[in-house]
Image: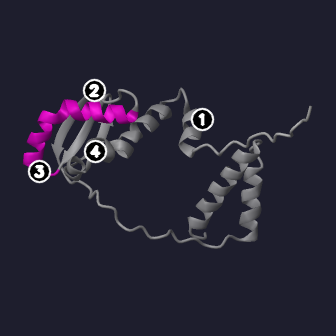
Amino acid sequence: MTTSSKRPKMKRPAPVTDLLTALLRGTPAEVRLKEGRIWEVWDEAVGTKIATHAQPAAFREGTLTLHVDSAPWLQQLNYLKKELIIKVNEALDEELIKEIQLKGGKVRSTTAKPQQAPKRRKLSEEERVWIKAQAETVTDPELRAVFENLIRKDREHQKKD
């Protein structure tokens, strides 16, 4: 018999949203995190044509308020409320939205604008030591590395005091 040495499979880092969901489970913030996903899935769930004319503005107790850019679209979407509710809830994988309220208002452009790379600054040795010390409080090595990277990036984008 030969024994083959198998190395344990290294886990991939978990997405930050998964970590936040686990951390916030059972708190009011968990509900807010779920509700915030409505904005993330909206464009894809309803399609570009509708998303160009209507965007989520608020969500409260099962009612999604949409800003719609014109009276003809307000009328058209009034007939499509049930379909929109179904599509967005399917994209969310749960039934958060019970009703839709339509209001006239400004709608953000759904066309992608070229993003500029965020400006970063060089960290001082003191800042690097501080970041390392903060990360050391996390016992899991993979999570510690992710945490340290997040702090470092946050500091690089902040203006020097």
Q: Is residue 40 magenta?
A: no
Task: Check disc 2 and report the residue beneath it.
Answer: 98
Tell me which segment is drawn in magenta: 69-92
Numbered disc in front, either 4 or 2: 2
Residue type, numbered disc 1? Leu
Residue 70's tag is 3
Numbered disc in front, either 4 or 3: 3
Task: Check disc 1 and report the residue beneath it.
Answer: 23
The residue tagged with tag 1: helix, strand or loop?
Answer: helix
Q: Is residue 84 magenta?
A: yes
- State the residue lying farthest toward the right: 1
Q: How dense is the environment of label 3, judged by Cα within 10 Å: few (below 14), some, or many (20 and up)? A: some
The Cα–Cα distance between marks 4 and 2, rounded to whole angstroms, is 16 Å
Image spot of residue 121 (x, y percent): 60, 72
The residue tagged with tag 3: helix, strand or loop?
Answer: loop
Residue type, numbered disc 2? Lys
Task: Check disc 4 and report the residue beneath it.
Answer: 57
Q: Is residue 13 left or right of residue 17?
A: right
Q: Is residue 70 left or right of residue 91?
A: left
Name the residue at 55% across, 29% down: 25
Mark sitting earlier along the chain (1/4): 1
Residue type, numbered disc 4? Ala
Mark sitting earlier along the chain (2/3): 3
Verify CB contact (< 8 Å) between mark 1 and mark 3. Answer: no
Residue type, numbered disc 3? Ser
